[in-house]
Image: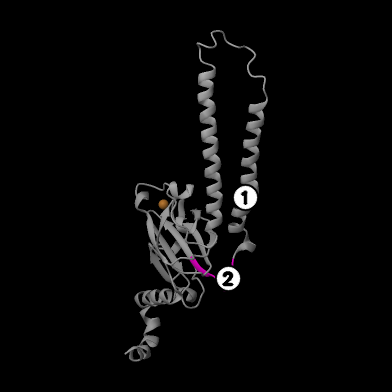
Amino acid sequence: MINKLLGIVPNASEHGYLVDHFLEFCHWFMAVLFVGWSLFFLYTIFRFHRSRNPKANYHGVHSKASAHLEFSVVLIEAVLLLGFGLPLWGKRVTSDSFPDAGEALRVHAIAEQFAWNFHYPGPDGVFGRQSTEYIKVSPIGLDPNDPAGKDDIVSKNELHLVTHKATVVEITSKDVIHGFQLQHMRISQDAIPGSRIPVWFRPTVAGEYELICSQLCGAGHYAMKALTVVGSQTEFDTWMKEAMTLQHPELVQPAAAPAAPAAQ
Ligand SMILES: [Cu+2]
């Protein structure tokens, strides 16, 4: 409830409700602390007003109540961090929590000032080699001589995913530090040049979402966003076929010719 009040976007991923529960609890806890400390503040202003205490008290407080209260707050915060926050994070980032390579949809996300490039392995399921020496001929530095890259799909500012299919996104950057943030999927990971960092999630609700850059990365940061389309496998395949037709017409034409009469 408090999440909604604070404007959280609806969850559209399998693990998102765990993040939401955690946020919900943290927000309620902070609300209680805020109200509690505010009341205490008002009480001190009233209780220790100059008119009631013309002479300063050089001994101060004798009661241990405030120390106990402070310790309880620290204890609850430690339990939140170590008992809930870390395990939740661990489930996202440890290698044994990742889905099997064959089961998941795999995408590379390559950030740049100020756009998102996505790299799909194409029908062969193998990503082509990438190297900085080819950055002038391909926005993601795809090696034109690598046969594995001949059918790869590169899309700009458009990420396509499949509902209920585990998705592994390997995130990197071409220039400065960016942030890959899919709020509806409750996923956020910095894009760091020189590193390829995987994240995984399972989208559960079809729709169009916004992927934003969550790190202030330069003058065009405000406009650095990409459309994320989550749909059925058929919708994904249709998009992939269109992309193949545009980017590798030589690979699709033989298959497209017999399909045309069948559709009529
Ligand atoms: Cu950015």
Q: Are marks 2 and 1 in contact (CB under 8 Å)?
A: no
Q: Is residue 24 above or below residue 130?
A: above
Percent x, y of residue 264: 31, 90
In the rendered image, which quarter is residue 53 located in? top right
Which region is colored magenta?
A: 99-107
Please tell me which residue is depicted at 40% across the width and 59% down the height of the picture.
Answer: 116
User: Which amino acid lies under the numbered mark 1 shown in the image of this protein?
Assistant: Phe
Please tell me which residue is depicted at 46% across the width and 65% down the height of the picture.
Answer: 205
Disc 2 crowd, CA 10 A, few/some/many (<14, 14-19, 20+): few
User: Which amino acid lies under the numbered mark 2 shown in the image of this protein?
Assistant: Ala
- Checking the image for residue 84, the label placed there is 1
> Which residue is under mark 2?
101
Instruction: Decide which of 248, 207 is in the foreground and name it.
Output: 207
Percent x, y of residue 1: 48, 49
Q: Which is more foreground, mark 2 or mark 1?
A: 1
Q: Furthest-top residue in view?
A: 55
Q: Is residue 250 above or below residue 98?
A: below
